[in-house]
Amino acid sequence: RFRINDLAPRYVSVVGADKKHLRMQIDRFACIGFKLGYWAGKLGEGDRIDIVCEPKFNYWNREKKVQLKIIDLVLHEPR
């Protein structure tokens, strides 16, 4: 597991049949946070976050890509 600080999330959304999972883009990496979908409503344009994550391979439609599995995140206080 890694902690990565001061990141700018983009394209934040919820996914899954029950809409309980968080999906976002950080730099060039796709990120997924299982059971973290409630964060989607709390993250906005210009927000900065710290994450604890694990790099994983995502196999989808015969493609293999690296994605970050978010374990936890912290939203920075507005400056």
Image: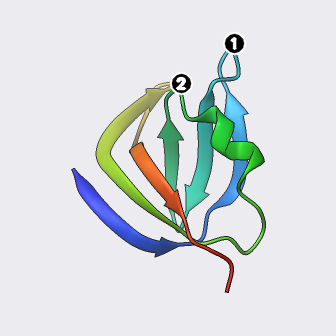
Q: Residues within 10 Å of mark 1 (few under 14, many from 20)?
A: few
Badge 1 element: loop
Q: Along the line of sight, which residue is nearer the eye, 58 or 25?
A: 25
Residue position marked by numbered label 2 in the rendering: 61
Q: Determine the residue positioned at 42% across, 44% down.
A: 70
Q: Residues within 10 Å of mark 2 (few under 14, many from 20)?
A: few
User: Residue 45: image x %, image y %?
Assistant: 78, 68
The quarter of the picture where the C terminus appears is bottom right
Q: Which amino acid type corresponds to the residue marked 2 in the rendered image? A: Asn
11 w.r.t. 13: above or below: below
Q: Which residue is depicted at the point 70% across and 34% down?
A: 14
Give the residue at the far left of this rendering. Answer: 1
Above or below, comparing residue 43 to residue 16 in the picture:
below
| Percent position of residue 44, x then y | 77, 62
Vertical position of residue 18 compared to residue 76: above or below: above
Look at the image and tell me whether residue 67 can be seen. Answer: no
Q: Gap between marks 2 and 1, in whole Å?
A: 18 Å
Q: Position of residue 72 (x, y in %)?
A: 41, 46
State the image quarter where residue 26 is shown.
Answer: bottom right
Residue at x 25% of width, y 57% of height: 2
Amino acid identity at mark 1:
Ala
The foreground one among 50 and 64 is: 50
Residue holding disc 1 = 17
Callout 2: SS = loop
Q: Residue at x 41, y 58 (%)?
A: 51
The colour mode here is rainbow
Q: Are marks 2 and 1 in contact (CB under 8 Å)?
A: no
